[in-house]
Amino acid sequence: MERKSKHFETKVVHSGYDSKNHLGSLSTPIYQTSTFTFDTAEQGEKFFAGEEEGYIYSRLGNPTVTALQEKVADIEGGEACLAFGSGMAAISAVLLSLTKANDHVLVSQGIYGCTYGLLTLMEEKYQISHDFSTMETEEQMKELIRPETACIYLETPINPTMKVIDIEMVVRVAKQYNIPVVVDNTFSTPYLQKPLEIGCDVVVHSATKYLCGHGDVVAGLAIGTKEIISHIAMTTQKDIGGILAPFDAWLLLRGLKTLPVRMDRHCENTKKLAEWLREQPLIKAVYYPGDTSHPDYEITKKQMKHGGGLFSFEIDGTKQQTQRFINNLQMIKIAVSLGDPESLIQHPASMTHSPVPEDVRLSMGITDQLVRLSVGLEAWEDIRDDIQQSLDQMAKDENK
Ligand SMILES: *Cc1c(COP(=O)(O)O)cnc(C)c1O
């Protein structure tokens, strides 16, 4: 009870772990074991029958992973959490457990490239079809909902176009039809946005990104009610097996403790850079949901604490010029992924969203001139100066 009243910043440090149960160890021990011993055959029987709680085998549960799951459930505002070996393992487990053959999924227009790939696979193998919706109005959504729609799946802000979907509106529609809503909350983290509190049913994360925050783990998480999460645990995860290793869980536990501090800096840097970049020549457009001029700013303000640590922009030039702009950066690293201390830049059309057919990609707003920047924890002036020198180089090349 008392724990519920603690602030987010306190929960990320203390929640889900009591050193008294671990010989006083301040840091969560890494239970680097595949299996657990039973005192007697009868105890083993009880564990398997679920009559007594205890660890059996690390695919079914591991204390280091449990500590992570309890912390994340608490900070995301859910009853339970399940950790996976990657974001895609979490997303596929959730989608596979919520659907059966011939079902339908309503998806936000603009989703992570591999989630698009997964939906295509589900359609080819199990005839689970999907429709994309911009989810701008209730009417648009209702037109696409069918009797066999088994779930609504969305990302907001959308990767990499930074459009924002009104979660409250989506929940209102979903409740009318009794359809569960799944939100990929990777970009925002629970520090900025809590979809479960708005009424969504499941939150998924690529914990690889901000939750880990140090670019050294690939991991996924799913959070929701005890009923949904234990269903996923006992069916899809147990038998498909995309679990998280104890050491990776430990790295995540460590990273999570500084999440609010890191997010504040990511967001502050991003806001300053986006404002500055908007005024530069050779920049056609800047997309940042934290900008008062962003078309979805009112929704951002309603459901997010800050605008996040990512933004996209379009270079006023060709694809080749855009790639040259990226190549001429000196400090900013060229890499996919996001949420790391290092600023990372990528070209969605040829990288993260290259599996998406060109016409679909363009309809999502992902042009050849669009670049996405994950703003790091460096001094913002140094990130700005790096972009400035690359833009100067571009201006010089143009005047040749
Ligand atoms: C990275 C990412 C994923 C996939 O996560 P992995 O950990 O790479 O499997 C899913 N959704 C979003 C929004 C992402 O950025």
Image: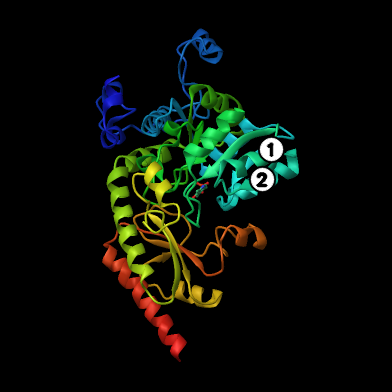
Q: CA distance from mark 1 to mark 2?
A: 8 Å
Residue 340 visible in the displayed image: yes
Q: How is the image coloured?
A: rainbow
Residue 35, percent from left and from top: 49, 26
* Mark linked to residue 9: none
- Is the Cβ of the residue at disc 1 closer than 8 Å to that at disc 2? yes
Dot 2: few (<14), some (14–19), or many (≥20) neighbours within 10 Å? some
Q: Residue at x 45, y 26 (%)?
A: 80
- Amino acid on which the number 2 mark rests in the picture: Asp
Any atom of ligand 1 within 8 Å of the CB at mark 1? no
Tell me the quarter of the picture where residue 141 sits. top right
Q: Nearer the viewer, residue 95 or 297?
A: 297
The residue at the far front in this view is: 139
Quadrant holding the C terminus: bottom left
Residue 357 visible in the displayed image: no
Q: Residue at x 44, y 48 (%)?
A: 187
Residue 149, percent from left and from top: 67, 34
Residue 178, percent from left and from top: 59, 27
Q: Is residue 247 above or below residue 33?
A: below
The residue at the far bottom in this view is: 400
Of pointers 1 and 2, the one earlier in the residue sequence: 1
Q: Which residue is mark 2?
A: 131
- Amino acid on which the number 1 mark rests in the picture: His
Q: Nearer the viewer, residue 261 or 131?
A: 131
* Mark linked to residue 104: 1
Q: Residue at x 38, y 41 (%)?
A: 252
Q: Residue at x 34, y 75 (%)?
A: 388
Helix, strand or loop for disc 2: strand
Quadrant holding the N terminus: top left
Residue 277, percent from left and from top: 36, 68
